[in-house]
Image (cartoon, coloured by chain):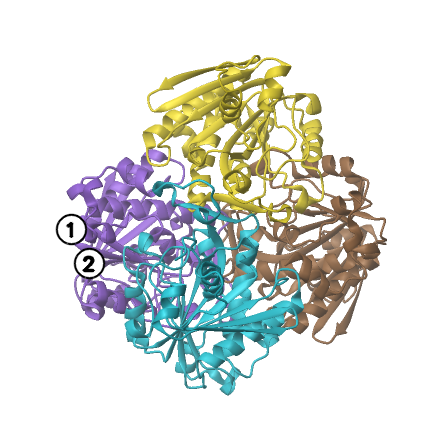
Chain colours: A cyan, B purple, C yellow, D brown
Amino acid sequence: MQSIRTDLAVEAHELSKKAAKNASEIDGVISDVEKKGNITVTRVEITNENGSRALGKAQGTYVTVDAPDLKYSLDTYERTCQTVAEEIRKMAKVGSDTLTLVVGLGNREITPDALGTCVVSKLLVTHHIKRGGENDIFGDNISGVCAIAPGVLGTTGIETADIIKAVSEKVKPQLIIAVDALAAADIERISNTIQISDTGIQPGSGVGNNREGLCEETTGVKVIAIGVPTVIDAATISKVKIPEEMSPLMVTTRDIDLVIERAAKTVANGINLALHRNMTLRDVESYVG
Amino acid sequence: MQSIRTDLAVEAHELSKKAAKNASEIDGVISDVEKKGNITVTRVEITNENGSRALGKAQGTYVTVDAPDLKYSLDTYERTCQTVAEEIRKMAKVGSDTLTLVVGLGNREITPDALGTCVVSKLLVTHHIKRGGENDIFGDNISGVCAIAPGVLGTTGIETADIIKAVSEKVKPQLIIAVDALAAADIERISNTIQISDTGIQPGSGVGNNREGLCEETTGVKVIAIGVPTVIDAATISKVKIPEEMSPLMVTTRDIDLVIERAAKTVANGINLALHRNMTLRDVESYVG
Amino acid sequence: MQSIRTDLAVEAHELSKKAAKNASEIDGVISDVEKKGNITVTRVEITNENGSRALGKAQGTYVTVDAPDLKYSLDTYERTCQTVAEEIRKMAKVGSDTLTLVVGLGNREITPDALGTCVVSKLLVTHHIKRGGENDIFGDNISGVCAIAPGVLGTTGIETADIIKAVSEKVKPQLIIAVDALAAADIERISNTIQISDTGIQPGSGVGNNREGLCEETTGVKVIAIGVPTVIDAATISKVKIPEEMSPLMVTTRDIDLVIERAAKTVANGINLALHRNMTLRDVESYVG
Amino acid sequence: MQSIRTDLAVEAHELSKKAAKNASEIDGVISDVEKKGNITVTRVEITNENGSRALGKAQGTYVTVDAPDLKYSLDTYERTCQTVAEEIRKMAKVGSDTLTLVVGLGNREITPDALGTCVVSKLLVTHHIKRGGENDIFGDNISGVCAIAPGVLGTTGIETADIIKAVSEKVKPQLIIAVDALAAADIERISNTIQISDTGIQPGSGVGNNREGLCEETTGVKVIAIGVPTVIDAATISKVKIPEEMSPLMVTTRDIDLVIERAAKTVANGINLALHRNMTLRDVESYVG
């Protein structure tokens, strides 16, 4: 049982192993690590109830892409986009007939919570072009993509999950990709880590603490969740108990605006490459800026 | 038949009268003007098919609130908010049990088209508070308000009207208020004029040229449309024919960022006062910043 | 000797008294507290070298204006503006012939460091109007105000103090008011506290850690410094030693964008009222938006 | 004598030739055109008083880089950056000992006027690194670069030229590069054209109509001016005389935010490549984002 809050399965796994002391293995959790140059891909699979309880996460696959110098290297950026695209494709089949709804969660007015809305603004959205039959410029390279940034409960007055369900029922996608900012336990994770999971989004996770979850059970559509840690909970690093009314406090980096911009570009282009199969990163960047 | 594009019924009326030459009256159009200090309220009622054809607008009531020094005077600002609130209340009954969905149309990335999204960010949204039973702080002063900024077709891939209908079917409001930036024919209208109408929004109107309309026929809910002119169509003032591919051109004012900010504040607080009946402007400003 | 970092003299004083244990008084530090309704004004005067060493601050007067519900109440906002104006006037004589240079320090790209640039954008700047002889609209109510937001070393490549000195030598003001975001020790200070001091700005203070100071000795002009705490140093609340390379970490509030907006408005209008003596807050708000 | 306002020498030349009717040549104006794939480089040299009067521009060299699909093609973007860099290097010798002050003119709050401030935020600024002796990471590849965005008269109260002169006297650069948004006569020029000239900036040019010029005579330092047309003067396209008080009107494109972003990136990286001689575009993009 950990009191440290993290939305990353890979951190929850490490903390669980530490808590279990001698145990290097936890029943119901399989993990493996793959190195791709300076990029590390960690796969954590939670396969049963015990694993789920131990890590405090839903059963499913959580892939963490760690790219330590994402911030400074174009080369790392390009290979990270490709890696994100590959991992998405492993989780979902996307053909030229597939319609995907990308959902950018979070509050655009609060910088560390703006990742999702930022990603949505960098997508190559095609649903209206394909429907209009004007997709000659793209040919069969593209699948259908639509996207919304539904806002947060405090500014809409509506449960975010309700807006997404309503739109999903109307446009009937075969896949939902939900993007959100996450909280991590380790400050070094901020800006270098992307988590991709096939479990959807659980209630209470994310920087803004989503009240309701977003997953296949609630939407009837497969949901891939993609997140990037942008804050550490103040409680995690604080030496004194932070009182309840201080919960609005957050720990983040001074260059969070730049971090969000870069992470959003990487995630957005990872999604663009996954969904528009024969396009190169350069093609995609030409269209979306 | 006019070739000058305007979203304002009051301008369409003037242009029609000019086109009809001697005719000071057009069958099916009733208009009257009321002065409230330096604020002028013009009511144009289109009562039959002939009036609708002559003005190129749907039948219904269009109220124009003109406040020439809105930009410089706090006093004018306050009385304009009150006037907008009164006109909304004349068009729709709002009790403490009413749920209103406010829709902020337009593209937040294009300044003159951002009015709607800007208004949404300045509303006193209450639906979640009332549902949660935590409305002790407000008492019976407030009605239920929820709000979305659905984005535009080019960035979502989804018809904006479809998103609004989907959300409306989910939250079941008794009233929709749709806010959008408008095109005017007269440059002096920019920033000084607010149009409120009970006809909803017609296809092809607005700065971004909404493809589908938004009205009681399509949503099943009464729709009040509120708009502020922020651009003049370049075609309106141009001496040479502007080629089709130049349509992205627009004429606006250098201080459009400030104009949008002030107009959005006036419209938002007009809506806030209309829906939260016993609150003062000062109360409202305390809550929404 | 405290290891907790704070830019607030009032906090440094409390910490010094605690460190000195039984000592309720420190030689060279005089402080008194005045209540004005819900606003608390604390004056800390550092009168000798011993006081300066004990508090780690230059000799001079530090006035702290605490307004706990600044965030929610228009009434508190208005009285806080007046209080800030009064305290500025106590520190500097301003007549209609005075020229004041207001300097907005900090990095506008980093939200919690953007206070200074934000204040500058809300000032009633008059130097060019007075020089142009077009000040009929204002009459004798206004003094001369000019303002710059010089940027930070990392984005200009120039020491900020050098830019300010260069501009000051060119425009020759009688007074400089320098505005900056501060670090506090107590999280409750964020957003509710304004510090006004006649000592100028010391090297190493401020959110962005100004490398050089800005004071009468270095500029030849009286410098009033105004600051608002927007962050807590992560080191202050951390239970583990935060490594050097993590120094970019900061602790702030989730609603920091709103906090900056409100604090900037209060400080800017405090300055406006101090310098344009016969204007009301309402007048000032009409001009600067 | 033309009544059409343009800041582009290449347009002024065309208009003069038209006005002179049969004259294909104007005494004192030499021009030549070079094609580099889809990029067109036009050099207009004004060599005497007659040419200066005919075109309404100072004597000197004006290079126009036209890249029609700058907006959509990464390849065009990269070659345009290189071309801008080459043209800057032809106008000024830059060695590793050179210190260049880049000045971003214009008002960041008015989108079409924000080009200069936008460029400044994308520069690889090195003066403080070289002075600090920490330039191991860059080696001899870089020259000294510092940069300011001085603001505009209306918000600073200070003549922009005075701020620049003051800072220039303090940091003593060997070269000033001044970047500003321009007005063009032809709407097709918006977003596709970059003008580079060795004449500095003349009074009355630029979107915000700089009141004082900025050139070698006034600063004592060689001034290269770089501009991109972002607006057309409303008077240029209007069929009716636009009254004086309507001068704040401007004609621009709906996607001006995107246009500014792309143009600023191209100009900034052109400058970066010109000043940091052995760096590749990719290197530069790694550092500045």
Q: Dot 2: what SS?
A: strand
From the top left corner, tell me how far across and down residue B273 is, in percent: 24, 44
Q: Dot 1: what SS?
A: loop
Which is nearer the eye, D67 or B12? D67
Q: Is residue D194 visible?
A: no
- In the current view of this chain or complex, which residue is farthest to the front? A22
User: Pointer 1: what residue?
Assistant: B94
Q: Eyeballing the image, is A251 above or below C121?
A: below
Q: Quadrant of the C terminus of chain D?
A: bottom right
Give the amino acid at mark 2. Answer: Leu
Q: Which labelled disc corresponds to residue D163?
A: none
User: Pointer 2: what residue?
Assistant: B175
From the top left corner, tell me how far across and down residue B55 is, in percent: 27, 63
Chain under callout 2: B
Give the amino acid at mark 1. Answer: Val
Q: Is residue C283 visible?
A: yes
Q: Are marks 1 and 2 in contact (CB under 8 Å)?
A: yes
The numbered mark, 1 or 2, whose residue comes first in the sequence reads 1
Q: Eyeballing the image, is C14 above or below A57?
A: above
Q: Eyeballing the image, is A111 above or below A46?
A: above
Which is nearer the eye, C36 or A79? A79
Which is nearer the eye, C203 or B69? C203
Residue lying at 26% horizontally and 69% vertically, measured from the top left: B166
Quadrant housing residue D1: bottom right
